[in-house]
């Protein structure tokens, strides 16, 4: 008896992608007994998760369907589902009540709704990234995860090991550093490598604005809508305020410009020195500083000067620049998109010195990162951004720790730092589980003490 083999779902997805390039006609949903639709589960239904799901469903290379959602907050899940079910991709949303999961084990239930080679979106606070990534790998799922992916040394080491495991299983993994997928920045990177502005001699980046996200928090009983929450749910809801949950505002918001300038340099910094402080904070109990200044040093001695400020009434700026021996470039003109990248012959950055500017309008990098991930899945191309995402997260944490301790922090010190912010998150059983950080009798939390605590941040 002759033996026949059936094509794998991944083989079919690759063949379907090739066929779509040859024909404008729609490919049937089922061909040869294999469904070409890539199913998606959303774990973490806040604003970023909702946006990521919308971008996923908008991917250009074939059929996508959202089939499951999970969060620890019912109100967030309801709001997210309502937004997606009423949005531009509503025809691709199929999440009935029985596939909407609430609770700390909801991520497992949502992933259990998927088939091998489907995609799970992980957009919870970063503290849960490794726990959920490990389960996704066990299930054979492709993954998109929000940045940052780690906030301390132990979780970075764990995620690096998981990244290797995902690669061995040929899983496709994207990380939400979408600037790396910006077509204008990709062209800028090539021009810098080709010597258009000479050798890079320094870089500088700024992220300065008023209060953002949940970065500044008052005590749980004083915050609107959180007085009745358990301590751990309060901290998850206000995750930007707590280093264990987010790496603080520094990691969550500043990672983009630290990553994009390091990308242009083609290297990661090896050490950082920094300063920072808290001003005009009133009754705030979060762990953040409201201003940071960091000097990053690269292997060849080149510097990146990063300035972050979160302060009402102060001047706002969100830009990144590269200075070379023959000219200069802007990586981000005013936010993430559009980048409006340009190069100049000098450093005054005037119209008279302009060499090149990327044509406008430019493609949306939030959509392009999904196009690239889904293309890799359908064409079965190697695709794993997790190692790079961990390195970007680690370098960001290095600058944060340098400010919080007032010490020089090296890459290796950050990677091997023993201070784990939130061990045991895989053992959480419910909303009354103990939080990784406990307030004192006045509802205040430990904060960094530069020069006093030198080998840990709190």
Image (cartoon, grey):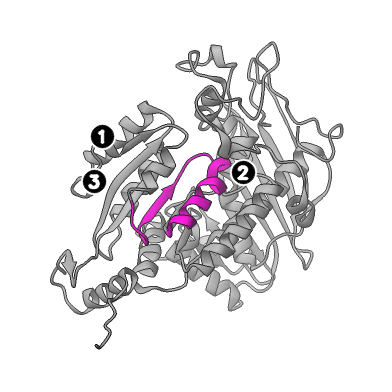
- The residues colored magenta run 114-140
Of the residues tagged 1 and 3, which is closer to the observer? Answer: 1
Q: Do the residues labelled 2 and 1 touch (CB within 8 Å)?
A: no
Mark 1 crowdedness (10 Å alpha carbons): few <14, some 14-19, many ≥20: few
Q: Is mark 3 on a helix, strand or loop?
A: loop
Q: Nearer the viewer, residue 353 or 284?
A: 284
Q: Is mark 2 on a helix, strand or loop?
A: helix
Q: Is residue 64 above or below residue 274?
A: below
Query: If the image is split into quadrants, where does the C terminus sit?
Result: top right
* Residue located at (22% from left, 77% from top): 19
Q: Do the residues labelled 3 and 2 touch (CB within 8 Å)?
A: no
**Label 3 – label 2 distance at C-alpha:** 32 Å
Residue 49, quarter of picture: top left
Tag 1 residue: 97
Tag 3 residue: 93
Query: If the image is split into quadrants, where does the N terminus sit?
Result: bottom left
Question: Any magenta on residue 21?
Answer: no
Relative placement, left or right, of 224 versus 398 is left
* Residue located at (45% from left, 37% from top): 105
Tag 2 residue: 251
* Residue located at (60% from left, 45% from top): 254
Q: Residue furthest front?
A: 1
Residue 196, quarter of picture: bottom right
How far across and how far down the image is residue 8, in percent?
Answer: 32, 72
Residue 308 visible? The answer is yes
How far across and how far down the image is residue 180, in percent?
Answer: 50, 61
**Earlier residue among tags 2 and 1:** 1
Mark 2 crowdedness (10 Å alpha carbons): few <14, some 14-19, many ≥20: many
How far across and how far down the image is residue 121, in percent?
Answer: 41, 49
**Earlier residue among tags 3 and 2:** 3
Residue 348 visible? The answer is no
Residue 363, quarter of picture: bottom left
């Amino acid at each position: 008896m002759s033996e026949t083999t059936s094509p794998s779902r991944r083989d079919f997805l690759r063949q379907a992608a090739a066929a779509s390039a040859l024909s404008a006609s729609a490919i049937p949903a089922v061909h040869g007994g294999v469904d070409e639709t890539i199913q998606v589960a959303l774990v973490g239904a806040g604003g970023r998760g909702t946006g990521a799901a919308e971008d996923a469903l908008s991917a250009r290379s074939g059929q996508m369907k959202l089939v499951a959602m999970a969060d620890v907050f019912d109100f967030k899940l309801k709001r997210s589902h309502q937004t997606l079910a009423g949005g531009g991709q509503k025809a691709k949303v199929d999440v009935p009540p029985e596939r909407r999961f609430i609770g700390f084990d909801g991520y497992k239930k949502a992933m259990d709704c998927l088939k091998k080679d489907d995609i799970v979106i992980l957009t919870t606070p970063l503290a849960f990234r490794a726990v959920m990534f490990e389960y996704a790998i066990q299930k054979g799922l492709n993954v998109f995860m929000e940045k940052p992916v780690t906030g301390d040394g132990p979780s970075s080491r764990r995620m690096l090991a998981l990244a290797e495991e995902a690669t061995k299983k040929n899983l496709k993994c994207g990380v939400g550093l979408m600037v790396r997928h910006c077509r204008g920045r990709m062209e800028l990177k090539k021009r810098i490598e080709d010597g258009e502005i000479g050798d890079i001699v320094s870089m500088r980046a700024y992220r300065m604005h008023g209060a953002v996200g949940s970065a500044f928090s008052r005590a749980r009983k004083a915050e609107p809508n959180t007085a009745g929450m358990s301590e751990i749910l309060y901290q998850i809801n206000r995750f930007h305020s707590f280093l264990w949950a987010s790496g603080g505002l520094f990691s969550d918001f500043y990672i983009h410009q630290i990553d994009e300038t390091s990308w242009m340099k083609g290297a990661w910094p090896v050490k950082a020195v920094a300063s920072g402080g808290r001003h005009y904070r009133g009754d705030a109990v979060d762990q953040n500083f409201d201003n940071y200044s960091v000097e990053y040093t690269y292997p060849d001695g080149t510097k990146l000067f990063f300035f972050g400020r979160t302060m009402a009434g102060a001047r706002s700026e969100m830009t990144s620049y590269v200075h070379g021996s023959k000219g200069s470039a802007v990586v981000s003109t005013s936010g993430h998109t559009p980048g409006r990248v340009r190069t100049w012959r000098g450093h005054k950055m005037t119209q008279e010195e302009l060499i090149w500017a990327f044509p406008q309008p430019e493609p949306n990098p939030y959509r392009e990162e999904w196009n690239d991930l889904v293309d890799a899945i359908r064409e079965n191309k190697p695709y794993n951004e997790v190692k790079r995402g961990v390195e970007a997260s680690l370098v960001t944490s290095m600058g944060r720790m340098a400010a919080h301790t007032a010490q020089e922090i090296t890459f290796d010190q950050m990677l091997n730092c023993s201070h784990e912010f939130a061990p045991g998150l895989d053992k959480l059983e419910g909303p009354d589980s103990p939080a990784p950080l406990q307030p004192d009798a006045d509802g205040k939390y430990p904060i960094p003490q530069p020069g006093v605590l030198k080998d840990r941040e709190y």
